[in-house]
Amino acid sequence: MFENVIDGIFSAVFLAAILRVTTPILLPSLGALISEKAGVLNIGLEGMMLSSAFTGVVVSAYSQDWFGAEVGTSVGPWLGLLLGVCVSLLLSFVLALFHLDLKGDLFLSGIALNIFGSSATVAIMFELTGDRGNTSTLASLQMPFIQLPEFINDIPLLGGFVFGVFDNQSVMTWLAFIAVFVVAFFLYRMPIGMHLRAVGENPEAAASVGINVKRIRYMALLISGFFAGLGGIHMSMGYLQLFQRDMTNGRGFIALVTPSLGGGTPIGTMVASSIFGFFDALGIRMGSLEIPSQLPQSIPYFATVLALVIYALQRRISQRVSEMRTASGAGFDAQFWQAIQRISILHMLLMMFAVIGVVTSGSILAAPNGFGGAEAALPAGLAIGAASIALIIMGLPFVSDIFRIQKRWRESAAVTVVSLGAYLSIFLSLFVELPIALGIGLVASAAVWFVIGGRALVGGK
C-alpha cells in the first residue's frame, strides 16, 4: 500500500489534485498581494471567503426555484458566483470605509469581519436549513468543469500526462492560474498598477505627484475582496458542492503569507500557493494509509507553521537589506541583494520540504503497519529521516544568515543543487531510468539556482 501511495503522489491524478486544492489559496493570495502592494493588507480575507462561499451555495440552490429546474441549473452557478463575489466586495468596501475614512485600525477591522463571516454564515444557515454544520439539505450547484480535446491524450510522450492533469478541472482553477498573469500585467505594465505600487512604497511621495492615495487603496481592497470572493466560490461550488461551517480552514490567513513567501510577485505567489496545495494534497493522499488520521491531517498545519517562520525570517532579512540600502545610499546594489533574497527564499522552501520529510519519517516509524509492515517501512522511514535531517543541517546556515550566502556562495550553490536535485530526481525517476533522472535533476536544479540569482554571485559582485 505504501508503494501505491508513493506512485500516486508522482502521478497526473495527484498533480491534478494539487491544482484543485491550490485554487482556493491562490485566488485570495493574489488579492492579498495587490492590497499589500498598496500598503493596506486585507486581514479580512477569511470572512470574505466564507461569506462568498455561503452566498454562492444558497443562491445557486434557490435559483432552481426562481427560474425553474432547467434554466436554474444553467444560470444558478453563475448567479451564485456573481452574488457571492458581490457580497465579498461589499465586505471589502466596509473594511476600506472603516480604515480609510473612519480611521479605524485595519487589523482589528479585518478580524471583526472574519468573526462576522464565521458567525453570520452559521446563523443564516441554521435559519434556512435547521443545521449548524452544513447545507447538505440544499440542492446547491457546481461551477462548470472544462474538458480538454481528446487529441491531447494521443500526443506521444507527455500528452497523456498533460491530459490527466488538466482535463476535467473546474473553470475556477483555470481562472485562478490565468489571473496570475493578468495580475502581473496589471501591476507591472499598466499605469494604474504602477501608481498602486508607488502608493504602497511611499504614499507621501505618491501624493506629492498627484496620485490619489485613498482612491488607490480603496481600489486595492476592493480587488482583494474580489479575489477572496472567487476563492470562496471555489470552496463551496468547485472544490465541494455544499457549504460547511468555517470550511476555509484558515486559507484566508495562509493567503496573507504566500505573497511574502513568493517574493512579492504574482509568479512567486503562485509557486508559494502551489507548495501549500502540495502539502494539502499530500495529507489527503496519505489518509488512505492505515495510520492514525491525525498524522496526515497535521501535514498542512506543519506547512503553515513553517511558512509563518519563513515569513518572519524574510521580514527580518528585508529589514536588514533596507538598513543597508539606507547606509549605502547611491552605492547600494539593489539587484544583487534581490538575487540574494531570492536564493534565501529557495533555501527556506527546501528546508520546508526537509522538515515535512522528518514528519513523514516519524509517521512511518510510529505506525509502520500502515506503510506495508515493519520490514519494509522501517528502513524507508530511517532513510527518509536521515536524508531530511542532513538537508536541514546543510541548509540551516544559509537560512539563519543571509550574508553567509554572499560570503560562501559556492557552498550555498552546492546545497541548493543537491537538495533540489534530489527532489527533482525522485519525480523524474518515474519516467526515465534513475541515472538519467539524477543527471537531469542536478542540471535542472543548477539552472534554477543560476537563473534566480546565482549569476549575480558568479559574476563576482
Image: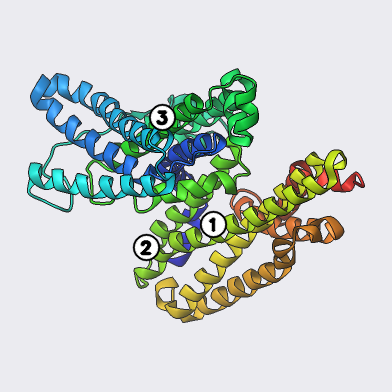
Quadrant of the image occupied by residue 170? top left
- Tell me if I can see residue 167 in this picture: no
Considering only vertical position in the picture, is 324 above or below 140?
Answer: below
Question: Which residue in the protein does label 1 denote?
Answer: 307
> Which element is circle 3 on?
helix
Q: Nearest to the eye among marks 2 and 1: give it.
A: 1
Mark 3 nearby-residue class (10 Å; few <14, some 14–19, many ≥20): many
Q: CA distance from mark 1 to mark 3?
A: 26 Å
Amino acid carrying label 1: it is Ala
| Element assignment for label 2 | loop
Q: Residues within 10 Å of mark 2 (few under 14, many from 20)?
A: some
Residue at 85 percent across and 60 percent down: it is: 408
* Disc with the residue nearer the chain's start (2 vs 1): 2
Q: Nearer the viewer, residue 320 or 225?
A: 320
Residue wearing tag 3: 222
> How far apart in space, not on screen, are marks 2 and 1 (Cα)?
22 Å
> Residue at image x 32%, y 44%?
113
User: Which amino acid type corresponds to the residue marked 3 in the rendered image?
Assistant: Leu
**Left or right: residue 98 compared with residue 362:** left
The residue identified by callout 2 is 287
Q: Quadrant of residue 45?
A: top left
**Where residue 421 appears, x then y in whole percent?**
70, 55
Q: CA distance from mark 2 to mark 3?
A: 38 Å
